[in-house]
Image (spheres, rainbow, N blue to C red):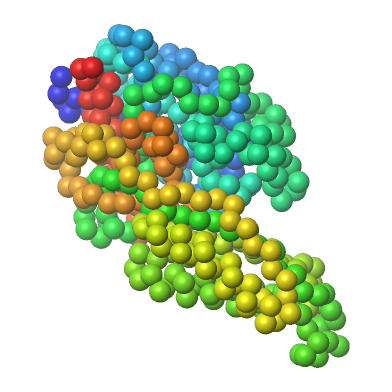
Amino acid sequence: MQSSNYRIDGRRLWDTLMAMATIGATPKGGVNRVTLTEVDRRGRAQFTQWCEQAGLTLRSDSMGNMFARRPGRDNSRPPVLFGSHLDSQPTGGKFDGALGVIAGLEVMRTLDDLGIITEAPLELINWTDEEGARFGRAMMGSAVWAGVHPETAIKSLRDSDGITVAEALAAIGAEGAEPATHTPADAYFELHIEQGPILEREAKTIGIVTGAQAQVWFDATLTGQDSHAGTTPPDARRDALTGAAEIILLVERIMRAQGDAGRGTVGRLTVHPNSPNVVPGEIRFGCEFRHPDDAVIASIVDDFPQQATDLATARGLALRITPVFRVAATPFDADCIDLVRQACARLGYPAREMVSGAGHDAVHVANIIPTAMIFTPCKDGLSHNEAESITPHEAEAGTQVLLDVVLARANRRV
């Protein structure tokens, strides 16, 4: 069976993407569909309706991960999985995550249109809280499913309002009956926008993703002393914010020392008491580092906390810093990668192999089952931004590759 003979409906794909983008739409053209909120509930409800209309059997696990199953000719075979996530950043784009889920739905619809029954069953997944924007832990649902983090620990995490993950799941009715643990599966494929500029710069239609880089996240609290901005002289100040500024610049220096492959970011900062005429007494911040080489991240884990502590101590500040999230560099499965490579060749799409700079649910899934990813370009490499944009042609090409690899894997001889 030459799967590239079968074509998805590009117009239907795009219309469905745009329909999902109305849920949580922002004035600047993006989406705000933060995990386990009312707007996330609406996105899940719309996904459920589409899956039911496609005749898929839908179930959810105790982390709210959603699985839409299409039976195969031999349902004793482990299923081929594919999907992504529907949650977004507070000022996110239309395509980050949603493309992979809606493309998976289009694969199911296309198979129905063509009357094709695959040998192995298929399952489309919407993972809970890939973004980590609300509870500070990215790829949360897939991490529990893959056994990377204990469910009890994840469910006890709190957002800035003190709401736990468990409470948020219950509030929108997302928690399912079955345990959030992996079951036998044949492979997993995830289509995603690149979230970087490489494919667009090189005029490539598809990124063949060979793995993902290592990363580590830290949570930090820097404590000084609140004092009057007008009456506290320089020598008497224990200004937590200026101390944080030095540590933030340290993060940048560490990043730049690694050259073009280095990544280091402080993206969240909470100032207390956050008053214009009070010297800040406490700063809470999160920072992260990423690199393709595990050894580089290991060195940062060893050195950065002490370097930051030295800067704090020199200013009379106390620093509590903890690594809260760490992912090793993850190679994807050679056979699954080769299916993506073959699909691009059959379909005539210009492609290049690349390592993902972002974390994805596929990183956790790859610890359990054979996994690969497919990237499409995005305009100017912009993502986690309301201006995030791809073209209908790019969405269609990525989905066509997804259909090709899913069919090839599900119909392989075993």
> Does the image show residue 341?
yes
Front residue of this view, candidates 13 and 229: 229
Q: Is residue 144 above or below residue 193?
A: above
Q: Where is 286 relative to 29, above or below?
A: below
The picture quadrant where one finds residue 363 is: top left
In the image, what residue occupies the spot 52% across and 68% down?
303
Q: Is residue 25 visible?
A: no
Tell me where residue 336 appears, x and y as whole percent.
26, 34
Residue 291: percent from left, percent from top = 40, 59
Q: Quadrant of residue 2?
A: top left
Most foreground residue, 26 or 188: 188
Quarter of the image that includes the N terminus: top left
Across the whole image, how many numbered discs are drawn on residues? 0
**Position of residue 340 measured from the top left corner of the image (x, y, whole percent):** 23, 37
Q: Horizontally, is 256 left or right of 152 in the view?
A: left
Q: Residue at x 48, y 65 (%)?
A: 300
Q: 231 above or below 7?
A: below
Q: Residue at x 69, y 68 (%)?
A: 319
